[in-house]
Amino acid sequence: IAPRFTDRPGGYTRIVRLAKPRVGDAGIRAILALVGNNDRPKKKRRAPSVKPEFTSQEATAPVLGSSDGVETESPQTSA
């Protein structure tokens, strides 16, 4: 075990206190674990980036209600 911790200045153990006391004498329970290089938190995976599902032709398609991309003038009313 010693060669594993040669470059570590301290903090060799992790103590995790358990919530429920021991049945019978109500003694405090804990888990003792050696801290190592394998105990580092893993990097979280990012969600895959969502790419648009339309093509450039669909993006430039005319909007419903317009004819051939030509705008028509609406009559203006004066109030």
Image (tube, rainbow, N blue to C red):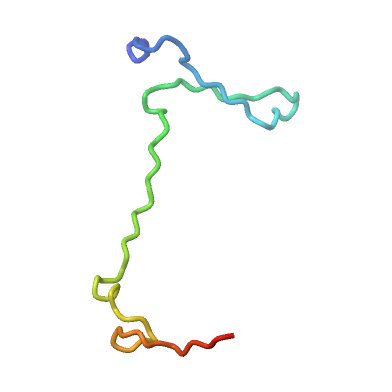
**Quarter of the rendering containing residue 52:** bottom left
Residue 15 horizontal side relative to residue 44, left or right: right
Residue 30 horizontal side relative to residue 75, left or right: right
- Identified at 41% across, 28% down, the residue is 39
Who is closer to the viewer here, 27 or 54? 54
**Residue farthest front in this picture:** 78
**Above/below status of 3 relative to 37:** above
- Identified at 32% across, 11% down, the residue is 3
Residue 23 horizontal side relative to residue 57, left or right: right
**Quarter of the rendering containing residue 19:** top right
Q: Where's residue 67, x and y in %?
A: 33, 89
Number of dots carrying numbers: 0
Q: Where's residue 48, x and y in %?
A: 34, 54
- Identified at 38% across, 38% down, the residue is 43
Q: Where's residue 12, x and y in %?
A: 46, 15
Residue 39 horizontal side relative to residue 68, left or right: right
Q: Quadrant of the C terminus?
A: bottom right
**Quarter of the rendering containing residue 30:** top right
Q: Where's residue 49, x and y in %?
A: 34, 55
Who is closer to the viewer here, 61 or 10? 61
Q: Quadrant of the N terminus?
A: top left
Who is closer to the viewer here, 73 or 12? 73
**Above/below status of 36 relative to 45:** above
